[in-house]
Amino acid sequence: MKSNTSLPLFRKPVVGRTRGFTLLEVIISTTILAVIMGTATPIIANSYINYRIVTAQQDLVSVLRKAQSLAISNQYESPFGVAVASGAYVIFRGPSYAERLPAFDEEISYSGAITVSGPTEIVFAQLSGRPNTTGTISLSNRELNKDVAVNEEGRINW
């Protein structure tokens, strides 16, 4: 015969009473979630800021290499160059940005939060790909600085 002193494995719910979370459990869970979000938000925001400047640097290198490649291939028998305009890099065809053929301009935009300093125009010579201007183009935002250098032989370092 079984003894009545053993505890049941499962409790039967009490009629009229619903199961749920207590107010204390909700407050603790919300506090933990707020602490996690408060810690993660600045990290995510900083990563995004850094991503924008790294992307702008990679875009600038790509634009410079494309203009140099077009000049070396002597496409349209014309030099090609890159001008750094406000918020965009412009690949142009012609001996200078002022004397270019605007119909052939190709604009690649970058974030307005990025400040660009250094040479504002680099033209690559036909066939040789040598630049008319050398120097370092600096990209910066409030957190990070990135440089792209063009030497007298046309090598692009970043």
Image (cartoon, grey):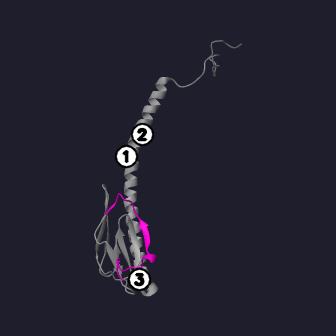
Pointer 3: what residue?
A: 71
Amino acid on which the number 2 mark rests in the picture: Ile
Pointer 2: what residue?
A: 36
Residue in the picture at 40% in, 54% down: 48
Q: Is residue 131 left or right of residue 14?
A: left
Q: Name the residue nearer the viewer: 17 or 62.
A: 62
- Give the image location of residue 20, x and y in percent: 56, 25
Amino acid on which the number 3 mark rests in the picture: Ala
Where disc 2 sits, the SS reads: helix
Where is residue 151, by image quadrant? bottom left
Amino acid on which the number 1 mark rests in the picture: Pro
Q: CA distance from mark 2 to mark 1?
A: 11 Å
Residue in the picture at 43% in, 69% down: 107
- Give the image location of residue 2, x and y in percent: 69, 14
Q: Does the rendering let one see residue 67? A: yes
- Give the image location of residue 34, x and y in percent: 42, 36
- Give the image location of residue 56, x and y in percent: 39, 64
Mark 1: few/some/many CA within 10 Å (<14, 14-19, 20+): few
Q: Does the rendering let one see residue 158? A: no
Where disc 3 sits, the SS reads: helix
**For residue 5: magenta?**
no
